[in-house]
Amino acid sequence: MADPKEAIKEKSMVIQKDMLAKQFHDLSKAKELGKKVVYTFVPGNLTELILSFDMLPVYPEINALQSGMRKKSAAYIREAEKMGHSEDVCTYVKCDVGMMLNGNIGPTGEQLPKPDLLLLSYTGCFTFLKWFENLERLYPGVPVAMLHTPYQEDGKITKDQTDYMVKQLNEEVIPKMEKVTGKKFDPAKLSKLMENSAKAEDLLVKILESAKRKPSPIDAYFAGVYYIGPIFTAFRGTESAVEYYTELWSEVQERIKLGLGPVTPEGELKEEKYRLVMEGPPNWTNFREFWKIFYDMGAVIVASTYTKVGGVYDQGFRHDPKNPLESLSRYCMGVYTNLNLPQRVDLIEKYVKEYKADGFLINSIKSCNSFSAGQLMIMRQIEQRTGVPVGFIESDLVDPRYFSYANIKNRLESYFQMLEQRKIILKQEGVAV
Amino acid sequence: MKSFEAILKECEGLAFDLNFARAKKWKAEDKKRILVGYLPIYVPREIIHAANGLPVGIMGAGDRKQIIKGDAYYQSYICHLPRGIIEMALDKNLDDFDGFMFPAICDCVRNLSGMFKLSKKGKFQRYFDYPQNFDVLIGGTFYIQEMEKILEDMQAVNGVKVTPEAINKAIKLYNTNRRLIEEIYNIRQQYPWRLSAVETYHILRAGITIPVEEHNEMLEQVVEHIQRERGEPMDNIRVVVTGSFCEQPPIGLIKSIEMAGCYIVEDDFMLGSRQIQGDINDNSKNPLEALADAYIHQSTFTSCFYDVENPRGKRLVKLAKERNADGIIFSAASFCDPALLDRPQMQQECDAAGIPHINFQYHENTGQFKVIKEQAGTFSDSIKLWA
Ligand code: SF4
Ligand code: SF4
């Protein structure tokens, strides 16, 4: 029998672990390998462009969440607060600053290299700007390339906005990458990478949409962030990402064939009782405990918004190798956190309906104004438009001071009771559930 | 000429009239007039003026309104400003406004624009995206397009097609406005006792709720009055207050700093009215270009503009030196990510320059100032002691 503390893993999870380990190992050897390192953000990331210059990307948010999962974030945050950061501000930033002050040791225990370029893809979150201004002062002299992604304030992407972004790519971002690497921009190489991206994107969408089935073969939130999504950011554009998603898709197809529910750290979910749509990032410091509350109750997240901060591929976007720079621009502008509030409400409504969800739940994150400001209005709108019970819990990304297990468990238990009640009523009324 | 006390009283009334009666009265005088509300920090008010509109600054409900509904829309860890504004919107304080502009200063204001859209408040609700690229041909072009969207929004409401002449005329008026405000700040450098920081605040805040022509007249009178002696010099230290550019500090806080023995010789309370430094070209064939140029080349520093090329910590130190300040007070709204994330770096710059500083956080409706007063008092005493 497996050690109960050891999570049960599928083959794809093992592949992912190896890919990530290699990535961090390469990063620790970047200088020896002669590779330049670029720090950048997940939403609106330019992974293909970075890889086309043979640079290695580092995503500080991923480091922060890894630090959270490895219980190191509390100390890092304290460190940043000691240097004057307020308790009120985004804990991702503080965790990252603290990690840097502590020697920049990455999740595998190897030291992360210093950046050669800070690529500030300012997409969907104002704090990114502040974050990299802070990093720039901690790494004096490192060039910063700023890419300002206009917000979809009107609920659409206009030609003016795309032109603005393409101009920035051509005149700010690419020249800085050329300077740092000493290489010329190679559009053909970029297009080739984008072909791979589109293939991986097709596969990712199939995997995510498999959750429309009953029972759902995946959990689109916990598993979504744990092993379905992460590979996407750092490896998009590579052959290995396509291979990874091919493997994952075949696993999911197998589960569908066998009528199996999602994999949890304690094995298969035996009975799918509640299907939920989830808004907001997860908590990382107590990720397993948090997930367990759901699978113990037979609750499966069938669609989530957080897994769309890296792109809304399920809404049709694909990287387009024929128009690489326009396509990268549209990609950045399309990510979930760059959608306006009415678009977010529409998307969630669509998820609740298309994924036949029993409820809608918000995990409201103290750190994250980009997600959290306005969520209570989103909640009301979804309740009015869909009639499903809505729930609201609060936690934080990587600050354990804001994760109260008892509180969250209590709230969720009452919420699940509410869902149960509704099921009974709907059954009595003869509505298929 | 009105008595100085009457002007000050009028300003105080206008500054905190959360029903914006004066603005609404102005609109009622002519069918083609429109009211455009804007949030902190800055919008190019000139284009609204040129479209026969009155730009009205909505700086939050402060401590003048009890927040009940607003709290139901916001988690406890979000700053106070948007909940006060939602409360005002739900309480009909903002009825009669034709549209709203939400400048790109942070995610709270950004998302508030969506809340106004969802609740269909006003005929348009525009998130006004400041470019963070400061190349005239890239960011400048984008900024012009942002202004054009607002012009279209306004035209859809009142049918007014804005001409370059109308914008140039507005630029001229706002140039005067900016010049008079700077003159007041300059006089206060030498004679800070003649006009208190609270009075200055009232005068500036009144200005964003009335037509610029009227405000200019008012400012001229203020300048005239404070050229004469008023009040008594005190043994106070001179401070710069920074970080209060969006959610406004309660008047009690500004008062407490002054009463604790500090002359506030520079601040960023009403930054929007002082964002652009110096005159904007009022004789351009393409005045939108002139406005974009001014945004790019003449903006002062704030936490909301990308600053890597020109770090704001250094600019703050420079400002403090120009104003001959003895110290800096970092005063930011609680949960204000832009201001608070800047603080450590800016404080390091102050340390490097040997400028003493203290910091506090507030909510716009904070009611207790004892601690702040004590802190500011100790700060002032210690500076005097070591001077
Ligand atoms: S505010 Fe939110 S989106 Fe922005 S850096 Fe923090 S956690 Fe990420
Ligand atoms: S006070 Fe700060 S966080 Fe709040 S709306 Fe203003 S800028 Fe944003």
Image: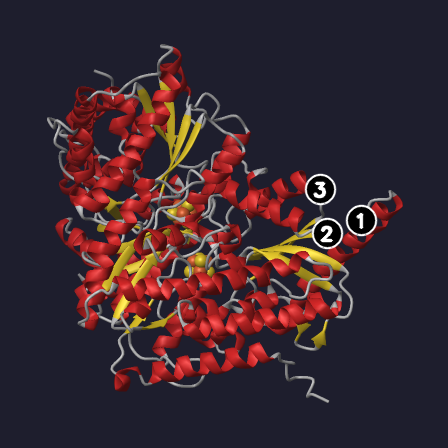
In the image, which disc is placed on residue A387? 3
Q: Marks 1 and 3: in contact by CB < 8 Å? A: no
Q: Quadrant of the N terminus of chain A?
A: bottom right
Q: Residue at image x 87%, y 42%?
A: A429
A163 sits left or right of B230 in the view: right
Q: Nearer the viewer, residue A265 or B378?
A: A265
> Secondary structure beneath disc 3?
loop
Does label 2 or label 3 sit earlier along the sequence? 2
Question: Few, some or many C-alpha atoms within 10 Å of disc 2 (few <14, some 14-19, many ≥20)?
Answer: many
Q: Marks 2 and 1: in contact by CB < 8 Å? A: yes
Q: Nearer the viewer, residue B179 or A272?
A: A272
Distance of mark 3 from mark 1, alpha carbons? 11 Å
| Protein chain holding label 3 | A
Residue under disc 1 on the same chain as residue under disc 2: yes
Residue denoted by label 2: A358
Question: Few, some or many C-alpha atoms within 10 Å of disc 1 (few <14, some 14-19, many ≥20)?
Answer: some
Going by the numbered disc 3, the residue's amino acid type is Gly
Residue under disc 2 on the same chain as residue under disc 3: yes
Q: Is mark 1 within 8 Å of ligand 1?
A: no
Residue A241: give x, y in percent of width and height.
Answer: 46, 71
Q: Residue at image x 62%, y 78%?
A: A10
Distance of mark 1 from mark 2, alpha carbons? 9 Å
